[in-house]
Image (cartoon, rainbow, N blue to C red):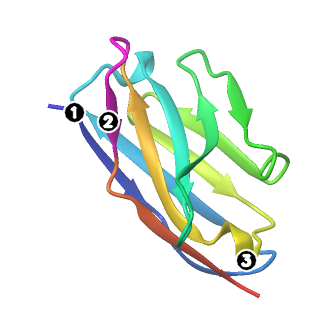
């Protein structure tokens, strides 16, 4: 059974940084595509960033140049480094694992709050 655990959220000031982690087990992590999503209060969940099994990264325009997604296949963990945080980045952040068979698994979410 695939398990996904998000962590690393917290409170940051505007302009600050946080790093989120996404640990996955029960699947061939190195073959999976990892996505980060976020959901702000009263808004729909939106896609933030992706890293493929080959290490190709893509970002939403709203975070491009500020956020960096990476992965460590030896640790079965993906990361989202968030710099230059803004109050509008406040949301619950979710990691999504897309396996080689195209099954999706979600983490439980981690709260990020950015104060102005």
Q: Which label number is shown at residue 87?
A: 3
Sequence-first tag of 1 and 3: 1
**Does the magenta portion include 99?**
no
How far across and how far down the image is residue 105, in percent?
A: 31, 36
How far across and how far down the image is residue 60, in percent?
A: 74, 42
Q: Is residue 84 left or right of residue 18?
A: right
Q: Nearer the viewer, residue 12 or 103?
A: 103
Name the mark nearer the viewer: 2 or 1. Answer: 2
Looking at the image, residue 114 lies above or below residue 75: below
Which residue in the protein does label 1 denote?
2
- Range of magenta residues: 100-106
Q: Are marks 2 and 1 in contact (CB under 8 Å)?
A: yes
Q: Are marks 1 and 3 in contact (CB under 8 Å)?
A: no
Q: Is residue 71 left or right of residue 109?
A: right
Identify the secondary structure beneath mark 1. Answer: loop
Report whether residue 6 is seen. Answer: yes
Furthest residue toward top: 101
Which residue in the protein does label 2 denote?
105
Q: Nearer the viewer, residue 28 or 111?
A: 111
For residue 98, which quarter of the picture?
A: top left
């Amino acid at each position: 059974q695939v398990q996904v655990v998000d962590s690393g959220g917290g409170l940051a000031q505007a302009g600050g940084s946080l790093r989120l982690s996404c640990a996955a087990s029960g699947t061939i992590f190195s073959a999976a595509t990892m996505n980060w999503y976020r959901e702000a209060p009263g808004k729909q969940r939106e896609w933030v960033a992706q890293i493929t099994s080959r290490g190709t990264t893509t970002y939403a325009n709203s975070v491009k140049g500020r956020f960096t997604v990476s992965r460590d296949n030896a640790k079965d963990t993906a990361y989202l480094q968030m710099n230059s945080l803004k109050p509008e980045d406040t949301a619950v952040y979710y990691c999504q694992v897309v396996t080689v068979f195209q099954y999706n698994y979600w983490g439980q979410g981690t709260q990020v709050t950015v104060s102005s």
